[in-house]
Image (tube, rainbow, N blue to C red):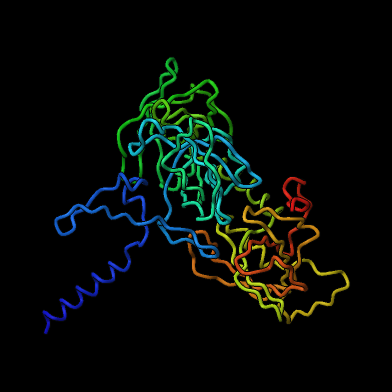
Amino acid sequence: MRHFLGLTLFCSAAFLVAQEAPKFRTDADGPVSAAKAKAKKVKGKDVIDVLDWYQIVDGKFPPKGSAHAISGELIKVDHLERRFHLRADRNDSQDRGVWDLPVDAELLPYGAIYYHGAPAALQDIPLGTHLHGLFYMRAPDDKTPPPSANNNRKTPELDFRRCFQLEDDFTFRTRQKQLWKIDSVDLTTKKLVATLHGEAGAIGKPQTFEVSTNTRVFKENGFGTLEALKPGQSVLFNLTWATLYGPGRIREIWLDEPSRKLATAHQMEVHRNNIRERGLPGWVDAVDDESQIVTITFFGNVDAKLFEDISIAPPEAPDAVKDPTKPPVLKGSIAVARETLMTYDPVNDRKGGVILEIKKVPLEPGSSGVQVRVKCDMLLEGYRPRRIVRFFPGTWKVIALPREEEFFGRE
């Protein structure tokens, strides 16, 4: 009996592991091309077993680990439509003939950007910056033609057109708790040799990077010069021209912790002001037409501190009678937005009312885990499940955006 029970538990555990295995293709399965997938033996025969990549479902956040990683250089941007071209890095899975070709992608509504260790917008990132991204396959009905240059050659990454996350080298290394330790510097040849270090020590072999006379050096609370680069320093840097002529060319380098913290703090304020002027992005989960209540889940592509403003009551009118026994009335307004997060005319076409509830919901990739229920004075046509909106807490001043940032009049 004991043996039987042990066998039962083993089988149950094996079943659970099998159930937890992803039902979609991941980067661990090898190259993106099925033609280069490894064969496995099934009943003595070679069989290529290739799962499909996860396909985004409207109104649902994607499962963890389902995106495809692509790194490359930002070479073209349409920040209003949140579209960009990324020249994909060279790697061993590519044939030489498809090196250095662009991926034409757009950010998902909940897609996040990070720059200098803080959330950012696409317009914050300079062209030429090397980025690390997570991508999903194009929508089944997406017939957008590929970039027409390069003699109609196409990168193997071409169909990964929906971007979930972008981050610069600074953020990528910071998130993984890694720093580059300088081994040597030769300003005559403009070469810097460094080894990547993590919490457990050195990672890989030393790599040789280029520096230039226009490489920006940050030291403590100001700028430094190339002469400040010394062996033994633990640094972070952002690259350009990565994989074209070796590991890359250093365009920015931070020599110490104070300079890195200053860069992150500055970008954080850039981001917070951007969101306060444009509203918290999210999508509508449910609408109660009879009670005029809209339920919104916010995206996780903004600084979590901004959600604290939802719980702050706006100033009362001078003649308002306050009852200390009653909780403050929280208010907010909702502007209809497009998939690109662009609003129409938020000063005039938003509606709102009293916030009935602020609650935590399960964290998922792309979600903030914050949800609100708002009782509106009037419902707009755009307040429908799965539609994108921007929410303005009652304490935020809503201003007219530059005309090119409003979709009103383009319909």
Q: Nearer the viewer, residue 191 or 365?
A: 365
Placement of 374 over or under 87, stated as above or below: below
Residue 256 is situated, as x and y percent measured from the top left of the image, at 48, 36
Provide residue 313's location: percent of width, then percent of height. 73, 68
Residue closest to the eye, 391 or 214: 391
Q: Residue at x 67, y 65 (%)?
A: 310
In the rendered view, tell whether residue 242 sits above or below residue 280.
Answer: above
Q: Nearer the viewer, residue 177 or 284?
A: 284
Q: Position of residue 10 (x, y in %)?
A: 19, 73
Does residue 118 appear anywhere in the picture?
Answer: no
Instruction: Report the side of 233 relative to 265 (left or right).
Output: left
Residue 182 location, x and y as percent?
39, 30
Quarter containing the N terminus? bottom left
Q: Residue furthest right?
A: 319
Residue at point 41% right, 32% down?
99
Residue at the limit of the structure toward the top, as seen here: 188
